[in-house]
Amino acid sequence: MPELITPTVRLRTSFLAAVAEFHAEPGQPVPWFVNDVDPPALTDPEAFAPYVARVLAERTEAGMRADAGVPMTTLWWAEGDELLGRLAIRHRLTPSLERIGGHIGYDVRPTARRHGHATAMLAAALPVAAELGITGALLTCDATNTASRHVIETNGGHLIATKGPKLRYLVPTSGAPTT
Ligand SMILES: CC(C)(COP(=O)(O)OP(=O)(O)OC[C@H]1O[C@@H](n2cnc3c(N)ncnc32)[C@H](O)[C@@H]1OP(=O)(O)O)[C@@H](O)C(=O)NCCC(=O)NCCS
């Protein structure tokens, strides 16, 4: 059974394969987290642990990303040693995240899509968000992103606003349906 796990060097090989898949996906923008991987970590096994450590440090006020402006918990969705997707929970919102990004963002690697992973991954993340004190998670997605809209709505998301091409949903973090 896939599960949400703390990022770990154990999944290095699969993580790098997933990164290559995202780069090779035709006609799709490369997710920001792929471009964010420290370049040495892509080739040097010794550099992967510092990259993972940096991602883990982003959970703290001291290590938070300057561009996010808030601590962020990154989790990986994995089955055994295979990475299927990743998800990040921002611990609070900024005016910028209120507009785009919200509390939670996620990606499923191209070869693992349409197997229910994003739906299950978000369901598994909602209790984690609740533990972080988030009672209602703001999620934003493009109106054209049918898959993400399904993921959010299946997890109890209520559409609260539409601004241009962006939809804003509020997802209760407790009492969400399990998948
Ligand atoms: C959006 C994304 C995370 C969905 O991942 P996934 O694991 O394929 O999603 P699921 O398998 O849980 O599918 C959820 C629903 O969307 C539907 N779906 C999946 N891909 C679809 C597609 N390309 N077109 C239409 N519907 C799609 C599924 O059939 C399912 O429908 P259901 O709820 O009626 O059963 C994935 O496509 C992805 O990583 N996209 C790029 C990054 C992205 O858009 N992230 C979200 C930003 S808001």
Image (cartoon, rainbow, N blue to C red):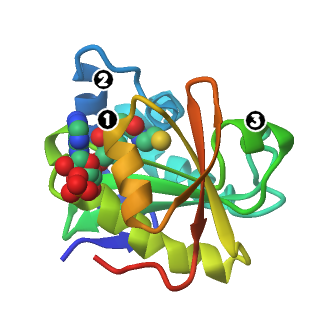
Residue occupied by mark 1: 19
Q: Is label 2's Cβ within 8 Å of ligand 1?
A: no
Image location (x, y in percent) of residue 32: 51, 31
Q: Is residue 149 left or right of residue 132?
A: left
Q: Earlier in the sequence, mark 1 or mark 3?
A: 1
Q: Nearer the viewer, residue 127 or 153?
A: 153
Above or below, 125 relative to 33: below
Q: Dividing the picture into quarters, in which one does residue 152 lie? A: bottom left
Q: Tell me residue 80's x, y (percent).
A: 19, 70
Callout 1 secondary element: helix
Is residue 107 among the parts visible in the rendering?
Answer: no
The quadrant of the rendering that contains the N terminus is: bottom left
> Which residue is the site of mark 2?
23
In the image: residue 25, left or right of residue 138: left
Q: Amino acid at mark 1?
A: Val
For disc 3, the marked residue is 67
The reply to whether dot 1 and dot 3 touch (C-beta < 8 Å) is no
Name which residue lies at 37% across and 33% down: 42
Q: Is mark 3 within 8 Å of ligand 1?
A: no
Distance from the alpha carbon under mark 1 to that under mark 3: 21 Å
The quarter of the image that holds ligand 1 is top left
Q: Amino acid at mark 3?
A: Asp
Q: How many marks?
A: 3
Residue type at numbered disc 2 = His
Q: Residues within 10 Å of mark 1 (few under 14, many from 20)?
A: some
162 or 6: nearer the viewer: 162
From the top left corner, tell me how far across and down residue 133 is, in percent.
Answer: 74, 78
Mark 2 touches mark 1? (CB < 8 Å) = yes
